């Protein structure tokens, strides 16, 4: 029999940890923002994001894509560790005991509460060894120079390292569509490096996400 | 990003002349459906932990080594320039007055308020030397230095660039900025020197020779470091 | 501070509240004792309210134990947030806390059908416990939670991923 009292051990009922009105706190007296654990937060305004792109472009030219991807990986590595620590603390249990639904929903909510848009996972090609990630309303590619090339390098880095750590497999991430080249959202494919090898060339030749996925799947 | 009715700041639209709007829930409008955050001035923001700053610095360090300091300064410079344009527009909208005609201290305080709401720390401007062509800015709780901790050298190149870029645009005169004292050197707050290029180069040279902030202030006030 | 009252203080140049504003304020203030009474009952009777519902779902509904546990957890969470929303007279509170979370959990664990039954049983329990006027205080936030949870907008199902 289900005992309601037992469900309420220590009276807690963990829910939406990243609910925005709970998660973000601010003190105008100190000029500080922090999260519900008291860790510092920063609001990065759009002009700074734009400046990151234009500043890096001025200083490093074409290499700026690689630099941003690297920054994304570093950022993602620490983000993953912090994210896991926060959830484990909140649920008062080792992360391994947490269901995947709760874990991923927290991840999506965390993404939104930070104002990074909406992140969705596409598991259509899971059996073929690919995981799709869609990011809508991305502030990063909205601030990036608009052109013909995907500009989601920061996100590519953070997503790649996040899922690499989550799955314990060395995954690579390739971007197939981008709002900076007038697509509806940013789409990424995660998979093993050698299976993703043809993607960049297909993106460069202007192929759409669906077509790229078809080719990848057919290549087996 | 294009502002639509969904992400434009509703409270601001309703009360366009409300000046005291810097508390978290007034300043930021969170749109939970889209995952967007719009500030009072209809600028989009993203929240990050200190990991973002670390990521930026580590990623740069890995690719360009010690040149990362100069790049962060350039990023700050670009930021300050973009921001001055946005600031001019909203200042004029909010106060019905050109920023050029406003009391300088009031103007600067108004400029910094959003940064306080955004968590970049408090500041203090010391303009007592402005007639000699330089001024000092103190920043308390710098996001960069607090993140990195005591590393024995100045690290807030992003702030230095921001000040240089912003003031260059506002004053319409080429200005540079250097951090001469930093929380990351074990000090309690960060101190920036803003002025013409020649002076800033001189200060940088003195710093390399081991001068501290007080030495630099003294030498500048004694008229060293150029016009 | 409730959302409704918040708006009273937003106006920058208004020095005094007008008659309408004061009436809003006084309506809320005079309803506080009743709201607190309902809140206290919900807080103190949490298990007593929910246990018969859990039993009914398991025995009469014939649902599996794990599913009942899931649904009861949802119910407890909704009731807690609804109670707080009622205390603050702020329906948006329920939305802020549950949106983007509970509906996704409902989908992931496929508890829509059992949650629906739970809400029916919950309404019955509450009408036993409270007067109709008291039920009306908590009803708006419960209904808001219910419609949020059973919102069928399509999202990617996360269960079973990886």
Image: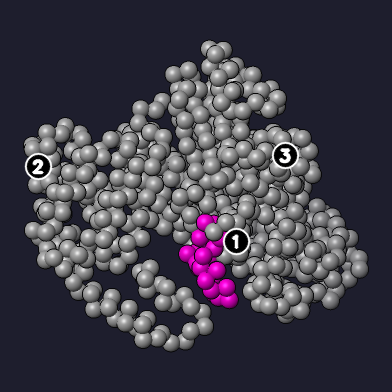
Residue A24 % position (x, y): 46, 56
Q: Secondary structure at mark 1?
A: loop
Q: Chain of mark 3?
A: A
Above or below residue A63? Residue B5 is below
- Marks 1 and 3 share the same chain: no
Point 55% across, 68% down: residue? B13
Q: Chain of mark 1?
A: B
Point 54% across, 59% down: residue? B5
Q: Decide if residue B62 is on the left or right side of residue B12.
A: right
Above or below residue C38? Residue A190 is above
- Residue behind mark 3: A147
Outermost right residue: B227
Q: Which mark is residue B42?
A: 1
Q: Quadrant of the N terminus of chain A?
A: top left
- Front residue of this view, candidates C136 and C33: C136
Residue C83 % position (x, y): 24, 60
Q: Which residues are magenta?
A: B6-29
């Amino acid at each position: 029999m289900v005992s309601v009292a037992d469900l309420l051990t220590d009276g807690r009922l963990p829910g939406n940890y990243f609910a925005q009105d709970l998660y973000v706190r601010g003190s105008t007296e100190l000029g500080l923002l922090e999260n519900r654990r008291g860790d510092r937060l920063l609001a990065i305004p759009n002009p700074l994001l734009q400046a990151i792109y234009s500043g890096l472009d001025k200083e490093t030219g074409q290499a700026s894509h690689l630099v941003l991807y690297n920054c994304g990986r570093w950022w993602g590595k620490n983000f993953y560790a912090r994210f896991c620590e926060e959830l484990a603390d909140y649920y008062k249990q080792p992360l391994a005991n947490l269901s995947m639904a709760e874990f991923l929903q927290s991840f999506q909510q965390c993404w939104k509460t930070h104002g990074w848009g909406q992140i969705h996972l596409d598991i259509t090609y899971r059996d073929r060894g690919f995981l799709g990630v869609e990011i809508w309303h991305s502030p990063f590619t909205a601030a990036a120079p608009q052109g013909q090339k995907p500009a989601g390098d920061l996100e590519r880095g953070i997503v790649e390292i996040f899922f690499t750590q989550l799955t314990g497999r060395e995954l690579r991430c390739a971007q197939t569509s981008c709002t900076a080249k007038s697509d509806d959202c940013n789409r990424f494919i995660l998979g093993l490096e050698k299976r993703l090898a043809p993607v960049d060339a297909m993106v460069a030749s202007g192929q759409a996400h669906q077509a790229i996925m078809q080719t990848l799947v057919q290549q087996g | 990003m294009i502002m639509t009715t969904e992400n434009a700041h509703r409270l601001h639209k309703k009360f366009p002349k409300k000046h005291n709007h810097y508390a978290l829930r007034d300043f930021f409008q969170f749109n939970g459906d889209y995952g967007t955050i719009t500030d009072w001035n209809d600028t989009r923001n993203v929240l990050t932990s200190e990991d973002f700053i670390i990521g930026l610095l580590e990623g740069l360090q890995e690719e360009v080594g010690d040149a990362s300091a100069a790049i962060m300064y350039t990023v700050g410079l670009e930021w300050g320039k973009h921001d001055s344009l946005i600031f001019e527009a909203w200042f004029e909208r909010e106060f019905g007055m050109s920023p050029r005609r406003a009391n300088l201290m009031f103007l600067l305080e108004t400029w910094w308020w959003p940064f306080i709401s955004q968590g970049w720390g408090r500041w203090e401007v010391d303009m007592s030397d402005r007639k000699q062509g330089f001024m000092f800015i103190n920043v308390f709780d710098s996001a960069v230095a607090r993140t990195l901790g005591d590393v024995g050298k100045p690290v807030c190149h992003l702030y230095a660039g921001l000040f240089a870029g912003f003031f260059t645009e506002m004053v319409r005169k080429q200005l540079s900025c250097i951090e001469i004292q930093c929380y990351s050197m074990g000090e309690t707050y960060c101190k920036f020197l803003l002025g013409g290029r020649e002076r800033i180069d001189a200060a940088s040279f003195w710093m390399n020779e081991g001068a501290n902030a007080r030495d630099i202030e003294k030498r500048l006030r004694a008229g060293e470091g150029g016009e | 501070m409730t959302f409704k009252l918040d708006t009273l203080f937003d106006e920058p140049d208004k020095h005094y509240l007008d008659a309408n504003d004061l009436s809003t304020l006084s309506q809320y203030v005079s309803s506080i004792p009743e709201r607190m009474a309902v809140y206290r009952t919900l807080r103190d009777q949490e298990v007593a309210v929910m246990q018969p519902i859990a039993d009914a779902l398991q025995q009469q509904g014939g649902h599996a134990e794990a599913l009942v546990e899931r649904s009861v957890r949802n119910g407890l969470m909704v009731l807690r947030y609804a109670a707080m929303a009622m205390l603050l007279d702020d329906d948006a509170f329920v939305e802020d806390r549950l949106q983007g979370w509970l509906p996704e959990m409902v989908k992931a664990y496929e508890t829509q059908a059992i949650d629906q039954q739970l809400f029916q049983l919950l309404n019955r329990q509450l009408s036993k416990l409270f007067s109709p006027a008291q039920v009306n205080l908590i009803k708006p936030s419960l209904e808001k939670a219910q419609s949020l949870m059973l919102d069928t907008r399509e999202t990617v199902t996360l269960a079973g991923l990886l």
